[in-house]
Image (cartoon, rainbow, N blue to C red):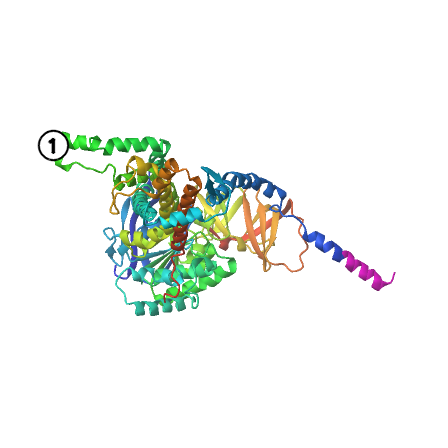
Amino acid sequence: MANKDLELIGITRRFGDFVALDGIDLEVGQGEFMAIMGPSGCGKTTLLRIMAGLESTTSGRMLVKGRDLASVPIHKRPTRLVWQDYALFPHLNVFDNIAFGPRLGPHNPSELRAKVHKMAELVSLEGLLDRRIGQLSGGQKQRVALARAIITEPEILLLDEPLSALDAHLRIRMQGELRRLQQALGISFIYVTHNQNEAFSMADRVAVLNKGRVEQIGTPEAIYHHPSSRFVAQFVGMNNLFSGKVTNVGAQYTEIESDTGPIRAAVGTRSPRLGETVHVVVQADKIKRTPAHTSNENKISAILRGREFAGSHNVYLFDLPDGSEIKIVSEDEAGSSPERLSGAASSLYFSTEDAFIIGFQ
Amino acid sequence: MTVAEHNTTTAMDNAVSVPSAAKVRTPNQSWLKELCLAPAMAWYAVFFFGPLGFFMWFGFWTVEEYTPVADFSLKNYREIFSNLFVGSRYAWGIAQSLWVALPAAIFATTFTYLVVLAIVYGVSRRYQRLALLLMVAPFWSSYLLRLYAWQIILAREGAINSFLTTIGLREWHISLMYTQIATRIGLIHYVTPILIIILYVTVSNIDRALIDVSRNLGATRLQTFRKVILPLSRTGLVISVSFAAIICLGDFLSGSLLGGGGGTSLIGRVPTFPDMIMSEYASSSNLPRTTAMATILVVIMLVVLAISFRFMEPATKGGRR
C-alpha cells in the first residue's frame, strides 16, 4: 500500500443517464510516469478532473499514498493539474503566476523569490519572469503552467494533454523535458493524451481507456505488441485485424476462417475453443508484399488503393475483398517505379508467428 | 536591340509591373468601409458633436435686452466663478452633487456586483438569462414613475411608515423623504439595471478554468475571489462606477422629486448642481450663463472619466521581484 502513489478503486461517474466512468481501477506506483490514453469522449479528462478534486465521483474511492481523499477539500489535495490550454492568470506576470500557490499560505518573500527563480531555471524560463502572459509563446506558457504547479510540491502531477497545442518539433522537445523533470522531481506524473506517440515515448505504463472503462494497462511495449482487446488493437499502433471463427487448434498454429480466407496464427499461452469468433492482429510492418517462401506463411489477396511516401518508409493502403482496409508499412524500396495505384491486385504475405489471436474467452 | 537593351527593357517592364502588383486591394480596403461608416459619422456630427459644439459656444454669448447675442465673452464664467462661495454658492452645489453621486455609484456598483456574482456562479446556466432579464426589467418602466413610487414608499405617511404604525413601531418611523439619501435611493434604482449588464459581461467572461486552477493550487474560495475574480473584474468595476457616477452627476429628477430640491445631507440643505442649473433655467433670463454652468458640469464628468481611466490600468505591478 505504502509504495503506491495513487490508487483508484471502482471510480464511477454518471452525468444523468450517461456513464462517463464505469468502475475505474488504477494503481500508480511510486514516482511512476503513467499515461492515460483513449479517444475523445472516453472519460480520460473526467478521470483527471476527479483526481484533481474538480469533479465529484458517483462512487468509488481514491487514495494518495494510502490516504483516502474523500474528505479532503479541493484546496488541500496533493494533486496538481496542468491544463491543456495552460489557464495562466492573465492579470499576473510570469513571476506572479508561478508564485501564486506559495503566496496563498505563510511565506517568506525573499525565500519565495529564490524558489521562483529556481523553478524558472528548472523549466528554462530565466529572464522571462517580468513578462506578461500575452507576450509568451505556446511553449513558454506551457513551462509557466508546469512551474506554477510544481512549485507547490504536489505528490502527483496531473497533465491534461499539455502538449497538444504545440507544434510537432516543440512537442518532441517538451516530451524529453517532461520526462527529465519527472525524474528530477521523483513524483508521479499522470499524463492524459489521445496521442499514442506521446504516451509511448514518455510513460512507464499506459492505461488505455474506452467508454469509461480501462481496456488495458501495461508497459508501452506490452500494449503495442500484445493488445488485449479489439479496441486496443485498433486504437494503438498500425494494427490490422482479421475476424473469423476458429476452425483448427493445432500444436503449431491456430487456424481461423476469416472473410479474407483461412489465416493461421501463432499459438499463445492459452488457446481459443473451436468455433469461437476471434480477432487476429497483424502489425502493419509485419505484412510484406513479397513472399518469404517459408512454410508458415499466410497469403491474402488485396487491391492496392494508395501509397503515402514518408521518407524512410512507405505506407500502403489496401482493400480486402470483404470491403475492409488494411495498412502496410514497408521500408522504402529504392528505385521502385511509381505505383499504378488504383485497383492493382496484389498478394500480401505475413508469417504465422506475427499473427496473434485476441478477444477469446 | 542588343541583349543589354533587351535586358534593360525587361527590367523596366518588371519595374513598372511591381508597383501595380503591390496595389492589390485586400478585402478590407474598400470604399464600402467609408460608406458604411458615413451614416454613423453623420449621425454623430448632426446629433452629438454639432449640438455639443454649439452648446459650448453658447456659454460664451452675452445677453442684451433679454436676448442672447453671439459673442465670445468670458463674462458668464466670471460671474459663475465669483459666485462659487458667495451668493448662489455654486461650489456647495457641486460638492453636494459629488457627495450624492459618488457614494450612490459605489453603492450601486457593489450591490450590483454581488447580484451578478450570485447570478453567474449561483444560478445554473439555464436560468441565468431569466435572472438577468428580471434584474434588467425595472429599466423598462418609466424613471419618473419609479421616482413617484419611491415617494409613496418613503413619504412621512408612506408605505414604510404606515406599515411600521400597523405593527406598533411608531417610534421607528423613518424620515428619509427630502433628504439626499432619498435622492441616492432613486439614483441607485435608476442605474442598477445598466450596471447589471456591464458587470454581467465582465464576470461571465472570466474563464472558469482560472477558478479551478486557483482552487487546485490551494486557494480557498475567499482567496480565489480576492486573487482571481476580483482583479479580473477590475476594469468592469471601474467602468461601472464611472458610468454610474456620470449618470448620477447629471441627474436632477431624483434630487428634486425625492430630495425635494435642497435635500439635507452632511453638507447641509443644499440642492445638487443640476438642480441649481434647472432653477436658473426656470428663473433667470440669462440662458448663456445657464449653459456655461452646464458646460462646467460636463467638464466635471470628463474629470471623473479621466480619473477612472487611471484606475483601469493593468493590475500587474512592474518590478515586483
- Residue nearest the observer in this picture, B180 or B312: B180
**Residue drawn at the location 42% of the way across and 68% of the way down:** A126
Residue B95, image x and y in percent?
31, 48
Q: Is residue B203 left or right of residue A2?
A: right
The magenta region covers B1-13
Q: Which secondary structure class fits the magenta region best?
A: helix
| Residue at mark 1 | B168
Q: Nearer the viewer, residue B281 or A118?
A: B281
Packing grade of label 1 (10 A; few <14, some 14-19, many >=20) is few
Count of all numbered marks drawn on residues in the image: 1
Chain of the residue where label 1 is placed in the rendered structure: B
* Residue A164 visible in rendering: yes
Q: Position of residue B7 (x, y in %)?
A: 81, 61
* Relative height, residue B311 to residue B160 (above, below): below
Instruction: Find out whether residue B8 is within the magenta segment.
Output: yes
Q: Where B147 falls versus A321 (above or below)?
A: above
Q: Is residue A244 visible?
A: no
Q: Residue at x 36, y 34 (%)?
A: B139
